[in-house]
Amino acid sequence: MILAIETSCDETAAAVVEKIDDSVRVRSSVVSSQIALHAPFGGVVPNLAAREHAKNVVPVVESALRSAGISLSDIEAIAVTVGPGLAPALQIGVAAAKSLSYIERKPLIPIHHIEGHIYANFIERRRPNSETRVQTPEPSTSPFPLLALVVSGGHTELVLMHGHFSYEILGATEDDAVGEAFDKVAKMLGLPYPGGPEIAKRAREFQDNLNDALSQETIPEFPRPMKESGDYRFSFSGLKTAVLYFLKKNESKKIDKNFINAVCYEFQEAALDVLLAKTRRALEEYRPKTIVLAGGVSANTELRRRMGEMVALDFPNTIFLMPPFEYSLDNAAMIGAAALFRWDCMSPEAKAQSLTEWQTLNADPNMPFNSNRLQSGRSLEDLAA
Ligand code: KG4
Ligand code: ZN
């Protein structure tokens, strides 16, 4: 059983997870959100976030242990998000995890935030899910090669995994991440923070009313940047600027709800068209066994639906996984999930070394994704049994 802590942005989270066969069982997952605190500022204020994490981290850990029905001594290891993220926010979680590791004499496992988002797909689904095509990896069969479409507030990339913790980045965004574009466009439209869910909601409203009076509205047409670039690079800042110019041209309509909904719809369509086109290309080129969604934007129901449809129709032999909704956004269960698999890949020496990790571990706000770092800067290859 692993206790995991996540404080990279504006959620203080702790979870207790364990491994059953090849999937991850969540015994408890607690997330204390700071959305209300940051909303008046239209985005996350790092020092405010850190202050809240400092206030909440111990009660959140306590609550995770209590709802798992265990005490600290029952835990076998402690996992923590070490980066990337906001430095003052990360430091609180890392300091808490180091203290627990030292006091309880338990191994400390540092985890990359995006790795956590990918491993959220290995969390078991306990209740039958009404969503279409939600699958779990078959225990005992390998899900690799696995293609991950990573879509969060800070990352947009297509990652090919040849095995556990072996990442090949096929392409990434050249500028804004897709979640960041959702948030910025929402801000331009005067919608509340965080913008992603709000845009998704309004796009749905627009779609539901497509045939009535709303269709008379000037329907915007936005570009699909780099859709035909012939590679796996993304760019979302041009799309954001196109929205900005369109709004400037139609300043007087900005108070019209129907107009705002139309902009949300077309923006989301443009962003999803690009994500799906690039994913299709990677599926054709690499023919992976599994495709997964990862990161906060994977909570977008239209993305989930369209990806499911594309895979079912054109790649019927590919397994499509998406994280359960509750583990799409930032949480600690996904960090614990990655740590459980990391632990299994570690040699006895690496496991022993993780007992003293608390002496050296530091938050790494710009941690590169494809680093195979396990702890103290040593690579996975160095430590492999
Ligand atoms: O993974 P996450 O919770 O935090 C980061 O690691 O960045 O992702 C947050 C991002 C935000 O940009 C948020 O607007 C976006 O995910 N997001 C969504 C939706 N829910 C959250 N974007 C589009 N549609 C959604 N339903
Ligand atoms: Zn995240």
Image (cartoon, grey):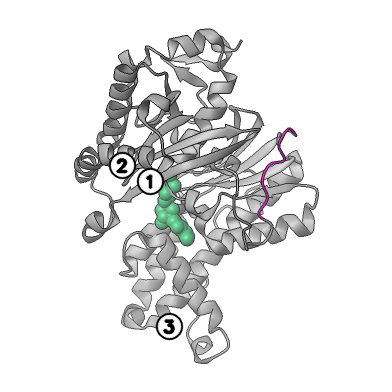
> Which element type, helix, strand or loop, lies under badge 2?
helix
Report crowding for label 2: few under 14, some 14 to 19, many 20 or more residues within 10 A (C-alpha). Answer: many
Q: Residue 47 in the image: x percent, y percent?
A: 20, 41
Left or right of residue 289: residue 383: left
- What residue is pinned by disc 3? 258
Task: Give the residue type at disc 2.
Answer: Val
The main secondary structure of the magenta stretch is loop
**Alpha carbons under labels 3 and 2: distance apart:** 41 Å
Residue 307 versus residue 10: which sits nearer the camera? Answer: 10
Residue at left 52%, top 72%?
221
Q: Residue 227 in the image: x percent, y percent?
A: 61, 54
Q: Quadrant of residue 347?
A: top right
- In the image, residue 193 lies in the stretch drawn in magenta: no
> Which element type, helix, strand or loop, lies under badge 1?
strand
Residues in magenta, as a range: 134-140
- What residue is pinned by disc 2? 60
Residue at left 37%, top 15%?
357
Q: Which mark is residue 30?
A: 1
Report crowding for label 1: few under 14, some 14 to 19, many 20 or more residues within 10 A (C-alpha). Answer: many
**Alpha carbons under labels 1 and 3: distance apart:** 37 Å
Mark 1 or mark 3: name the one nearer the start of the chain: 1
Q: Which mark is residue 77?
A: none
Q: Is residue 218 visible?
A: yes
Mark 2 or mark 1: name the one nearer the start of the chain: 1
Q: Residue 265 in the image: x percent, y percent?
A: 50, 71
